Image (cartoon, helix red, strand yellow):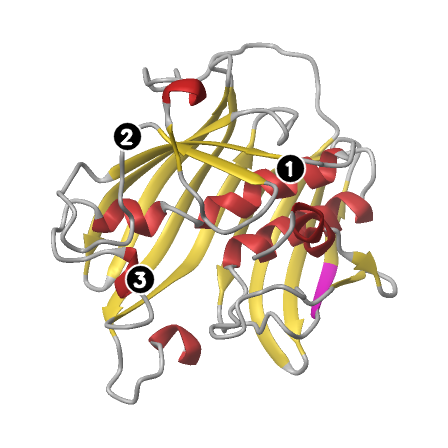
Amino acid sequence: MQRGSDLVRTLDVQPDGPGRYVGRPDPDADRARRVVEGSQMLGQALVAAARQVPGRRPVSAWMGFLRVADTTSPLSFELDEQSNGRTFSGLAVRVRQGDRLCATGNLLLDATAADVIRHHAAAPDVAGPDLSEPYDLGVAGQEVRFVERVDLGDPLAPAGPPQIDAWVRFHDVPDDPALHTALLAQFTGNLSIAAALRPHRGYGQDDAHRTLSTAVNAIGFALHAEVRADRWMLYHHRSTFAGDGMTHAECRVHDLGGDLLASFSVDGMVRTRERSGRDAAQVL
């Protein structure tokens, strides 16, 4: 289990030469599985980009996760500045662990501007955090509450629609906008595959890495507003497709007042485990 301060420390990548940042190993990660979540790498890349181009806010990012990264070894984030104009900066990012290329992506940062027009998708009409069910995902400093009672692990739990609404907030977050954005992004990989499994009785997240091989393959992320990750955020996960060993989810994040903070999409895989006992995710 990560303590709240350890999660922030993990996301807060440090300079390691021109255009390079290093993500420190997680001292409290699950030693049995030792797999870095793709959404953690996305959060770390967003922090690196904010440090590389100070004064600009990440507005769009896409990352594809090519190979598994080990939680016990440092990650190297290499940023290649594609453009740096008066309003926008474009960065390509490569994430390596030793000589292994683990992820690649592109990030767009903006100086922001005054509104010309404004609208946003409405928040789902759901119960607030005070009326929602607490759920422990094993990260200290992270508070999660499900709008509906959902048992993610039990394959015999009643089937439901392919969506999960969850309120999330983090405690003890430094007053650093990059880290608040990274914490929002870090949670994007947590529930999209669970939403895909939910309509299919007989499958649950406890099957992952046992009888099923699951992984997040890519995340597309758009940030619409300044984030306070220490205040309640409503994550609306809706799986729009599952088949051919793949899943797709289209998701939104709203604040407690209903304003839209971020949108994201997640492409994942759900496959039977290889007979060798290794996850397919480990040989991508």
Place of residue 150 in the rendered image (x, y in percent of width and height, measured from the top left): 27, 39
Element class at badge 2:
loop
> Closer to the camera, 242 or 256?
256
What kind of residue is marked 2? Glu
In the figure, residue 224 lies in which quadrant? Answer: top right
In this rendering, the answer to whether 255 lies above or below 85 is above
Q: Which mark is residue 148?
A: 2
**Which corner quadrant of the image does residue 228 belong to?**
top right
Mark 1, residue position: 181
Tell me what residue is drawn at x 13 percent, y 53 percent. Answer: 156
Quarter of the figure with the N terminus:
bottom right
Q: For mark 3, what is the residue?
A: 269
Q: CA distance from mark 2 to mark 3?
A: 25 Å
Say above or below: 61 vs 129. below
> Helix or strand or loop: what does disc 3 sit on?
strand
Give the camera-side residue of 117 and 52.
Answer: 52
Q: Is residue 88 visible?
A: no
Tell which of 279 and 116 is nearer to you: 279
**Is residue 84 part of the magenta span, yes or no?**
no
How far apart in space, not on screen, are marks 1 and 3 (Cα)? Answer: 26 Å
- Vertical arrangement, residue 142 with respect to residue 175, above or below: below
Magenta segment, which residues? 75-79
Q: Is residue 194 left or right of residue 160?
A: right
Q: Quadrant of residue 245?
A: bottom left
